[in-house]
Image (cartoon, rainbow, N blue to C red):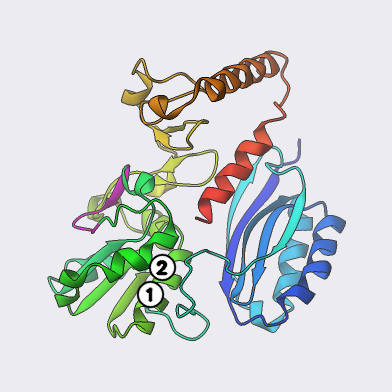
Amino acid sequence: MARILVAALYKFAALPDHAALRAPLLAVCKDNDVKGTLLLADEGINGTIAGPEPGLRTVLAHLREDWRFADLEHKESWAQANPFKRMKVRLKQEIVTLGAPEADPTRQVGDYVEAEDWNALIADPDVLVIDTRNDYEVAIGTFEAAVDPKIGSFREFPDWFAGQADLSGKSKIAMFCTGGIRCEKSTALLKARGFDEVYHLRGGILKYLETVPQAESLWRGQCFVFDERVSVGHGLEPGPYELCYACRRPVSEAERASPAYVKGVSCPACRDELSDEKRERLVERQRQVELADARGEAHVGADLATQKMRKLERR
């Protein structure tokens, strides 16, 4: 079976005509058997697509024909089958939702810091280090001494930061996220609010784990990722976590040993949150998954799970 190339991409760029880009982009994706979801907004593009390698590279070339995407970067991975069932190009208000109009990465962002220079920056006592990810991501890994805002979604970040008057005594602020997109938006927010020395990790945690040797690393734990790997460690090696289908939180080996963990149904974090009705639906879904596995077939709910992961990624 031919392997499928998966590309995750984003680019902040001023796109006042983004609605007009939708139809041609959707057409070239469909013509090349590329599936997934791309978001277009005034501020740029974001999404993940997958397809046969020649087709996917044709789509990327189409995007880069637009001068605003000429330097578009993407991250590649491979799959044995396409993780998406259809192709969607959606028009949105934001490509990553922050809900703060003053945060405009097309006008200003913080200073990029390369992975190999990150350790020196965050070791500086004058630097405040902030993890901009959601609470369930931070729970399984972060950088030493990083502040955890304990937010459930990225849109909570502006209000959280506004309430941290005691943090503004630091002369420099460094922020990081999984792949870089949230950091560009959050540094734009801080720049708009008058902070001068604002930095962010280019390429995010993933680039750091790929680049910095483990012996020199200041990263502790695993990095949550929005795909079937669930988490990765140094060298981007897949980690020991699985995903709870009910709540989409990562579940450790120790948590999977708990009586509260029922594969496909619940984990210690969500067991008490489930209604009897939802629990029954999840039990039946898991039964259907196991029956499909026994027949060597893909369960029809697999694509729904992938869609849920992509929605989480944009929170």
Number of labels in the image equals 2
Q: Position of residue 66 (x, y in %)?
A: 72, 80
Q: Residue at (59%, 55%) from the top-left corner?
A: 76
Q: Residue at (53%, 21%) from the top-left corner?
A: 279
Q: Is residue 80 left or right of residue 96?
A: right
Q: Is residue 6 left or right of residue 172?
A: right
Relative depth, front residue between 120 and 248: 248
Q: Which quarter of the figure has residue 307?
A: top right
Query: Height in image: 293 above or below 147?
Result: above
Q: Which residue is mark 1?
A: 187
Q: Position of residue 220 (x, y in %)?
A: 26, 47
Dot 2 lies on which element?
helix
Q: CA distance from mark 2 to mark 1?
A: 6 Å
Relative depth, front residue between 70 and 107: 107
Query: Height in image: 129 above or below 298?
Result: below
Relative depth, front residue between 131 and 41: 41
Q: Which residue is mark 2?
A: 183
Q: Residue at (60%, 22%) from the top-left corner?
A: 281
Q: Are marks 2 and 1 in contact (CB under 8 Å)?
A: yes
Q: Position of residue 287 (x, y in %)?
A: 62, 15
Membership of 146 in magenta stretch = yes
Q: Which quarter of the figure has residue 209?
A: bottom left
**Numbered range of the magenta stretch:** 140-147
